[in-house]
């Protein structure tokens, strides 16, 4: 741990305390987020656990995303769809009406004229009776769609011209610890697929870095204050790699809430954005106990990418800022 890390850790602890104190007094004003994109900045929005059959809450969050972009007057350069893209049946697969109502029109191209990078969640890994994840891979091939899922796991750079972040999109639908493949309605990756992905992840992380930042994303959180809790298999397989290769952020959904967790001397910030529309879950661990932030609330998240900083903001279904932090290339964190 360098001197810089020590200083920033102290600052982080102090600021997270200040944040908790502030949070106790009420919401942070929305204006705190109101900064137009500066030169060299690119912005993207992410949403998790969104394709719920009753899309009342999904619509509210999607409206808030649209209003936020319009009010702030920035161009969204990507959407990240963090899994549990489809709950319930997706009748007709790629031809399902739900693609139109709950994706294309819900997050319209007129506002989000960009790629929507998707990863599969456990609800996508369901045969109802056809595999929904198979339909998602197929839909990505449709002409003119923004839906981007070239394979179950893949990587890309953001923004496309002058990239600043290498994004590693993972499939976290792990087989059981004993290596048993559940091939029923709620299926998973096969053990050999999980092994193949792990080898690929190692190889990706070992490539020489061409961007100042690296982000990994998978539907299942590695650590979570929500009811799903910490994930044994991902802690065993992925967490040591994130640590070793100093991955800046791990983005997840799965628990239906919003979180940001930091761990002493861990280079990775753990972000959970699972408030996209499915019924909310009650937290199991309070943010005061493990944080700096965990809240049972609908919402979405924004990532502002600049050469010297990544700024992650959690916003609620009214577009109000509920949490924000900045990550530097050297891994230091400032919570504001
Ligand atoms: Fe979910
Ligand atoms: Zn899930």
Image: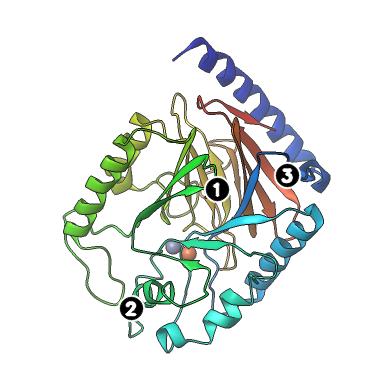
| Quarter containing the C terminus | top right
Q: Secondary structure at mark 2?
A: loop
Closer to the chain start, of discs 2 and 1, is 2
Relative vertical location of residue 263 with respect to residue 28 in this rendering, above or below: above
Question: Would residue 114 be seen by someone viewing this image from the given angle?
Answer: yes
Q: Residue at x 51, y 49 (%)?
A: 284
Cα–Cα span, label 3 and label 2: 40 Å
Q: Residue at x 64, y 60 (%)?
A: 298
Crowd band around label 2 with a 10 angstrom C-alpha radius: few (<14), some (14–19), many (20+) = some
Q: Secondary structure at mark 1?
A: loop
The nearer-to-camera label among 3 and 2 is: 3
| Quarter containing the N terminus | top left
Q: Position of residue 275 (x, y in %)?
A: 59, 60
Q: Position of residue 220 (x, y in %)?
A: 41, 54
Q: Secondary structure at mark 3?
A: loop
Mark 1 and mark 2 in contact (Cβ < 8 Å)? Answer: no
Q: From the Cβ of disc 2, is ligand 2 less than 8 Å away?
A: no
Crowd band around label 1 with a 10 angstrom C-alpha radius: few (<14), some (14–19), many (20+) = some
Left or right of residue 120, residue 279 in this image: right
Closer to the chain start, of discs 1 and 3, is 3
Mark 2 and mark 3 in contact (Cβ < 8 Å)? Answer: no
Q: Residue at x 46, y 87 (%)?
A: 95
Crowd band around label 3 with a 10 angstrom C-alpha radius: few (<14), some (14–19), many (20+) = some
Q: Quadrant of ligand 2?
A: bottom left
Q: Which residue is mark 3?
A: 37
- What colouring style does the render use? rainbow
Q: Which residue is mark 1?
A: 159
Q: Which residue is mark 2?
A: 131
Cα–Cα span, label 2 and label 1: 32 Å
């Amino acid at each position: 741990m360098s001197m810089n890390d020590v200083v920033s850790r102290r600052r982080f602890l102090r600021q997270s305390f200040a944040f908790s104190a502030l949070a106790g007094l009420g919401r942070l004003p929305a204006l705190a987020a109101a900064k137009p994109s500066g030169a060299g900045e690119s912005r993207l929005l992410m949403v998790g656990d969104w394709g719920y059959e009753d899309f009342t809450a999904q619509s509210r969050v999607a409206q808030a995303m649209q209003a936020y972009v319009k009010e702030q007057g920035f161009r969204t350069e990507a959407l990240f769809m963090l899994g549990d893209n489809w709950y319930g049946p997706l009748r007709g697969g790629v031809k399902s009406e739900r693609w139109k109502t709950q994706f294309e029109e819900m997050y319209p191209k007129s506002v989000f004229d960009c790629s929507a990078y998707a990863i599969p969640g456990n609800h996508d890994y369901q045969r109802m009776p056809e595999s929904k994840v198979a339909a998602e891979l197929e839909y990505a091939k449709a002409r003119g769609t923004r839906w981007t899922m070239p394979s179950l796991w893949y990587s890309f750079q953001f923004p496309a011209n002058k990239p600043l972040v290498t994004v590693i999109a993972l499939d976290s639908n792990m087989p059981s610890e004993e290596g048993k493949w559940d091939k029923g309605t709620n299926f998973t990756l096969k053990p050999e697929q999980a092994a193949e992905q792990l080898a690929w992840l190692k190889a990706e992380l070992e490539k020489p870095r061409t961007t100042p930042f690296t982000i990994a994303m998978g539907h299942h959180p590695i650590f979570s204050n929500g009811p799903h809790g910490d994930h044994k298999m991902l802690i065993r397989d992925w967490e040591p790699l994130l640590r070793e290769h100093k991955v800046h952020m791990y983005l997840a959904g799965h628990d239906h809430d919003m979180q940001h967790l930091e761990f002493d001397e861990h280079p990775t910030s753990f972000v959970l954005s699972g408030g996209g529309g499915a019924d909310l879950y009650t937290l199991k661990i309070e943010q005061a106990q493990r944080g700096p932030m965990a809240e049972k609330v609908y919402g979405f998240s924004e990532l502002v990418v600049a050469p010297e900083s990544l700024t992650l903001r959690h916003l609620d279904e009214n577009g109000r800022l509920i949490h924000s932090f900045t990550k530097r290339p050297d891994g230091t964190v400032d919570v504001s």
